[in-house]
Image (spheres, grey):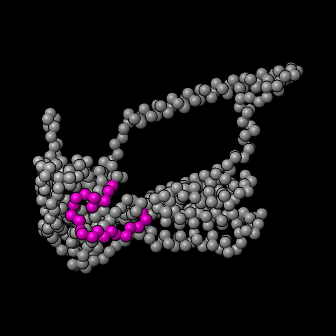
Amino acid sequence: MTVLGYPRSWSCHCLPVLILLLGIGHGPWVEGVTHYKPGDPVILYVNKVGPYHNPQETYHYYQLPVCCPEKIRHKSLSLGEVLDGDRMAESLYEIRFRENVEKRILCHMQLSSAQVEQLRQAIEELYYFEFVVDDLPIRGFVGYMEESGFLPHSHKIGLWTHLDFHLEFHGDRIIFANVSVRDVKPHSLDGLRSDELLGLTHTYSVRWSETSVEHRSDRRRGDDGGFFPRTLEIHWLSIINSMVLVFLLVGFVAVILMRVLRNDLARYNLDEETSSGGSSDDFDQGDNGWKIIHTDVFRFPPYRGLLCAVLGVGAQFLALGTGIIVMALLGMFNVHRHGAINSAAILLYALTCCISGYVSSHFYRQIGGERWVWNIILTSSLFSGAAGHNHPAAADSLAAGRLSSHCHWRHLWEEQR
């Protein structure tokens, strides 16, 4: 066949290389370091808020009634940060490199009863906030809740209106950032009438200190305090219950299969004895039991294109998962960079598209497939088409890479013929 000529093969070679070159420039393992001079402004981005016990549920920070600029300017995010759910926007905090600030006023606010109720619900659900300073995430709680008594049950809710930022630097680089509310009294949100406005004054302090640590990765694990719990609570009773249930089900299925297999073997032996004794109706009933499937073993499935596409995409995901695990074990991810693993997954997904193209084309050729164009389209869009609902641009680039690799392998198969 001459459908796939030299120009198309050349494009199939170049597209994966272009994807590789585009991905290397913003690798997730490259640590972006910003150098500052004394007095240079350090931008603090507000990112997101959400319940502490469900970190996957996040909202924009400015959805809460907090100090907000008149015009919100968002930061341009990388693909990994978008997939990680980041929503960075510039804040009103004015921070300068190596300049301490003591209780500077951020803004004055007048909150209505509806806004106060919104803050109360967020504090009751243990909402946390996340800010970003020089790619360093800093987290804290929106407010404070104190529960007391059983009957009657009561709780006090307060809002943190003052934040203390502690930043450590080495030379002209920021090494560590943290926020705390130590020695700060929360502003009570209790006892407010429905027609009453609540006046708040938000303030903040900034303290700089020099550290001997030269790189962010040199800090000992646990120096950042570990905002989210790192220990996983193991429910041993549930695990034992699940294991017992699995063993029982496997045992039941094995007993049933053994009984069926024993009966089939006894029937086959009886048929052989009757056939050797000269019986004339030994093949009247035909094959039965396990012999029925012998005609289906070497028969091609009706949807061979779909089968090959699933095999190709599955092989690609196996290589993708292996690559992510190996990169994590080698320490190639920068833990201080937002969305590093997500960016690496997208990059590896684009680079491993040749695996899905090879596996799908190879199996499709072995089973004698003829509609190879449909196989190419199905393999290229089987996963990226479903994922493109939320990120169409990324899905288009991934589909293009997989389509080019599939064309390349198809061209090689045609040349071998």
The residue stretch that appears in magenta? 58-80
Q: Quadrant of the C terminus?
A: bottom right
User: Camera-side residue: 363 or 115?
Assistant: 115
Measured as percent of width and height from the top left, residue 357 is found at 63, 60
Pick the front one: 153 or 116: 116
Estimate the x, y position of residue 362 in percent, counting from the top left: 68, 57
Q: Is residue 302 visible?
A: yes
- The number of numbered discs placed on residues in the rendered structure image is 0
Is residue 205 visible in the rendered image? The answer is: no
| Figure quadrant of residue 315 | bottom right
Image: 5 above or below 139: below
Q: Residue at x 26, y 73 (%)?
A: 42
290 sits to left or right of 152? right
**Quadrant location of the N terminus in the rendered image:** bottom right
Dominant SS in magenta: loop
Q: Is residue 299 magenta?
A: no
Task: Name the residue: 17% across, 56% down.
Answer: 112
Where in the figure is residue 204, as x and y percent of width and height?
16, 65
* Residue furthest to the front: 195
Query: From the viewer's perspective, is residue 249 above or below residue 130?
Result: above
Q: Is residue 68 magenta?
A: yes
Q: Residue at x 72, y 63 (%)?
A: 413
Judge by depth and name the residue closer to the eye, 369 or 96.
369
Estimate the x, y position of residue 72 in percent, counting from the top left: 29, 68
Left or right: residue 381 versus residue 132 is right
Q: Residue visible at 27% across and 77% down?
A: 36
